[in-house]
Image (cartoon, grey):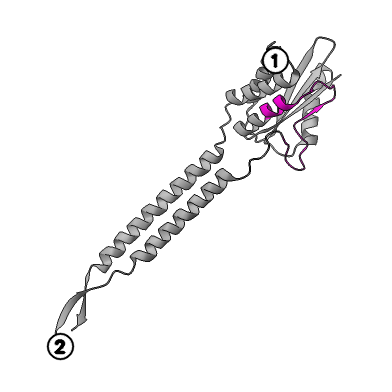
Amino acid sequence: MAKKRYVRKKNTSRRPGCFLWLLLLALAVGLALFWILRPASDAGAAPAGDMGWYTDDLGRIEDDKALVEGMAAFEKRTGVRPYLTILDGIAPDALDYFVQEEFASYFSSGDSLLVVYDEWGSDEYFLSAQAGAGSALSAEDVETVLACLEAAYADPSYKSYAQAFGAGFEQGAQRVSAPAKTGGAGLLLALGLLLLALSAVLVLFLRKKARTSARWDRVDG
């Protein structure tokens, strides 16, 4: 009569599991390096096909570097693209309507903010702004941005319109309640959490396989 004995199965499941973990790790590292080392875009350049950052009918902006840097910082912080129009001759009581009409003709996205600077007379000006429906900026945020622009405009330490408005946008970005965009740091954090979760699942899988392979199987001897 044939006897029965117990034998231990050989563990053949560890190598594929380790290989899968290394593959996932390499993928995560590759994505992180691609994000970090990707060519940086010029903060002063408008996207292709874009209308730019501002319109200056009065020739007040001579060197727009400070202005564009401040507006780019605003967009990076809030995710809302600002646009500045400098003109004169709009009656104060018609300015808000003019801004609404201009916004509707310029933008189709709620992630935009139109600011209009209107000179009226020799020593008076008005500022008005419009954000799109569904924008990350609330009505209070828009008022906050206008207040920052007015404060910077009145600050004698800024020697030009470009410096004043650029500083106003940058300061406004720090004071609005719109959530800050995390950018690359957020992506790296998400990749890290994903890798951690996948590693935990893989470890549990390998442990289960190891326990299964350690069991004794009955075979005919």
Bounds of the magenta segment: 45-71
Q: Is 200 situated left or right of 145 in this image?
A: left
SS assignment at label 2: loop
Question: Real-space Cα distance between discs 2 and 1?
Answer: 99 Å
Q: Is 173 situated left or right of 3 in this image?
A: right
Rate crowding at label 1 as few (under 14), some (14 to 19) or many (20 or more) other CA atoms within 10 Å.
some
Identified by mark 1, the residue type is Tyr
Give the image quarter of residue 11. bottom left
Q: Which residue is mark 1?
A: 158
Q: Position of residue 81 (x, y in %)?
A: 68, 34
Q: Is residue 3 above or below residue 63?
A: below
Q: Residue at x 36, y 65 (%)?
A: 15
The earlier-in-sequence mark between 2 and 1 is 2
Q: Position of residue 160 (x, y in %)?
A: 74, 17
Residue 201 is one of the magenta-drawn residues = no
Q: Nearer the viewer, mark 2 or mark 1?
A: 1
Identified by mark 2, the residue type is Ala
Q: Quadrant of the C terminus?
A: bottom left
Q: Which residue is mark 2?
A: 2
Q: Is 216 situated left or right of 41 in this image?
A: left
Residue 70 is one of the magenta-drawn residues = yes
Q: Quadrant of the N terminus?
A: bottom left
